[in-house]
Structures are given as structure tokens and as C-alpha cells.
Amino acid sequence: MIYECTDCEHCANFNGGFRVFCLHPGLIPQAVCDYHPVGNGDAYECGEFDDFNSSHCFTWEQLTEAESYSIKKYDEVTYEGIREWCLKYLKEQGPK
């Protein structure tokens, strides 16, 4: 079953919403696939999505960095690796 996600605070996205990852500490990183709208599309279909107006919005180039991080750590691109990269990046940036 796919549920409606209403927690934008933990929604990280790359390239303006085309790749979405859940940063919620209580959910697995791929949990985003269990929720609308991402479970059936991308963040552009979410009424709460405000592209590039969040600290959790990353560029396509940053996705490449995150994937490289994941490959180095897990030998493949994983949801866990992408999430770890996101959280590391956000921590390095500090509070906004």
C-alpha cells in the first residue's frame, strides 16, 4: 500500500525533484518509495514541493558526488549511501 507523505522536512531531492530520498531518522532511506507522490512519480507531483527552496535540494552534479560516495563505501549505489552523503553534506554546511 502507498501512503500520502506529509513530511517535507525530511525530503531530500536531486535535480529539482526527479530523484527523491527520505532523510527521516526513523525511516529507511528507500521509504520514500512507499509514499505518494514519489511512489508513483517524482516530487513535482507533490503539492508541497517548492523546488530549490530548501536546504534539502541538491543539484544533478551533487547526485554524482553522492553516488561516488556510495560506491566507495558500499561498492554500489545504495539508498543508504545517498542518504549518508546528504546528511554529511548538510552537517558540513551547518545551520542556515
Image (cartoon, rainbow, N blue to C red):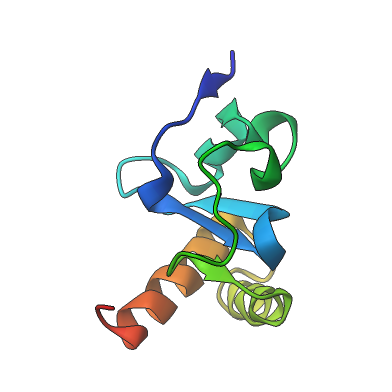
Identity of the residue furthest to the left in this view: 95
Q: Is residue 48 left or right of residue 91?
A: right
Q: Quadrant of residue 19?
A: bottom right
Residue 1, relative to residue 44: is it above or below? Answer: above
Question: Which quarter of the figure is the N terminus placed in?
Answer: top right
Residue pictured at 56% horizontal, 65% vertical = 82
In this rendered view, identify the residue nearer to me: 60 or 72: 60
Q: Position of residue 49 (x, y in %)?
A: 55, 47
Residue pictured at 75% horizontal, 36% vertical = 41
Residue 34, relative to residue 44: is it above or below? Answer: above
Q: Is residue 67 left or right of residue 58?
A: right
Q: Quadrant of residue 81?
A: bottom right
Q: Can residue 94 be seen from the camera position used here? A: yes
Residue 46, relative to residue 11: is it above or below? Answer: above
Q: Quadrant of residue 27?
A: top left
Q: Position of residue 12 (x, y in %)?
A: 51, 58
In this rendered view, identify the residue nearer to me: 16 or 73: 16
Question: Which quarter of the figure is the C terminus placed in?
Answer: bottom left
Q: Position of residue 59 (x, y in %)?
A: 66, 75
Q: How many marks?
A: 0
Residue pictured at 49% horizontal, 73% vertical = 85
